[in-house]
Image: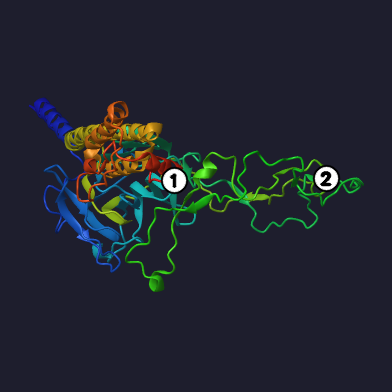
Amino acid sequence: MGGRAVLLLLVISALFAQIHASDPLFHESFNESFDGSWIVSGKEEYKGVWKHAKSDGHEDYGLLVSEPARKYAIIKELDYPVTLKGETVVLQFEVRLQNGLECGGAYIKYIRPQATGWNAKDFDNDTPYTIMFGPDKCGSTNKVHFILKHKNPKTGKYVEHHIKSPPSVPYDKLSHVYTAILKPDNEVRILVDGVEKSKANFLSADDFEPALVPSKTIPDPDDKKPEDWDERAKIPDPVAVKPDDWDEDAPMEIVDEEATKPEGWLDDEPEEIDDPEAAKPEDWDDEEDGEWEAPKMDNPKCEVAPGCGEWKKPMKDNPAYKGKWHAPLIDNPNYKGIWKPQEIPNPEYFELDKPDFDPIAAIGIEIWTMQDGILFDNILIADNEKVATSVREKTWKPKFDAEKEKQKAEEAAAGASEGLSEIQKKIFDILYKVADIPFLEPYKTKIIDVIEKGETQPNITISILASVIVVIVTVLFKALFGGKKPVAPVKPAAETKKPSAVVPDAAAGSSGDKEDDKDAPRRRSRRDA
């Protein structure tokens, strides 16, 4: 009987251990309202409103940052502190930046035990923590923080130690899960969406800034550089003399006297002229708006000439230019190197085999953000990586996969729309080239008007294309079979009619009108601007 009892006890113990190993130390799913279990800070500066809300497109609830440009603070005290010494500890949580993140934090602070009499309502930026972990983005800052506050056993002071190679924050609006795995061998691994992005050793000076273990020596703060210490490796040659033919006043550039004015240069023509088709607006008030001036346009005469306006000879490099003379540099005979203070023993130095982590007594979120829509979910502390992986696969993965599929569908739809826009752009490029065909010169201005209206209303692209084709066909028909007497031009239709109705009769215009139109300056279109 005694042997059976012992065997039964061992089986029960093993089952208990297995069940315990499959449970997280802490898991907040936010399936229920956080009221009563999470305490909002009572400090005046934290005006942001927390809400129990669904993730966009899901039935899953989370803790929502509901207002932009606010400070937020909320804390959850654990039933019992979680020790971080001598065992694996996994910190994990989900964050979804539903409106993106231009400037703000979405990290969690793992709070150490507070002094007697401390109240959760007093939670603020100064509340001491053990670890700060999570996304932070603003300006040049874009990182997933991992900060450890470690106590120096020599001084009793807590020092912040930042991981040197933090991952970047995913730049999208999908759900992401952040995991920090603290191992007994002093290693910490940072995962984003279950993929390792960074790894560090707590005791390595290369992995944390500043290093957890201080250097054995430090520069002597009382050591001073001697007055005669010369740090100059090179000095001007004291015996060097400026050459007699060195002219320091010679200019860098001189006028090219051999240059000649290009043939056809239009001295009396300005580069820009008043737009002859511009008219003073009817509601223009000279007293209130000032004297009206017509907008400028490129002078069409300058387009075919080598240049307009007063011609001046160009400048060229001056072959006699040498600049200010400086004595050449030589080795400094008194050079002693860069001075450094002598090293002395570091009074704060200590040796360490393992980090002396403080326990986690509470979980707090204390952030400032310019964006709302930040949703926290499935905050987890576990002593087993498999537990964290299981929770991640069951809670985060289905949401992420659904969001990713939706994103792909939206991008595909946007791509199709963009493709159509590219086709329309190519059509308008062709139409502008058509407008430059010589035999359409009398109708060029009006055709461009129609094309520009089509660019502002892409939905009528086909109508515009058809209208221009009608003009071309009509002009060709009249040229081949037209009568002796040309027909007078048809005036453009009223603004209220469809753009296709604005295209003039292709047969319109007398020979005199054509010559006038041809010599008239080309109006600068929106496309040319």
Q: Is residue 85 left or right of residue 388?
A: right
Asked which secondary structure carries label 2, the reply is: loop
Q: Which residue is mark 1?
A: 520
> Would you identify the image quadrant in which residue 120 lies?
bottom left
> In this orientation, which residue lies closer to the viewer: 385 or 457?
457
> In this orientation, which residue lies closer to the viewer: 2 or 64?
64
* Residue at 77% from the left image edge and 56% from the top image edge: 226
Vertical position of residue 439 compared to residue 335: above or below:
above
Across and down, in percent, residue 435 comes to: 36, 35
Across and down, in percent, residue 449 comes to: 32, 44
> In this orientation, which residue lies closer to the viewer: 321 or 77?
321
Q: Which residue is mark 2?
A: 332
Residue 185 seen = no
Q: Residue furthest bottom?
A: 287
> Would you identify the image quadrant in which residue 38 lies?
bottom left
Residue 344 seen = yes
Q: CA distance from mark 2 to mark 1?
A: 74 Å
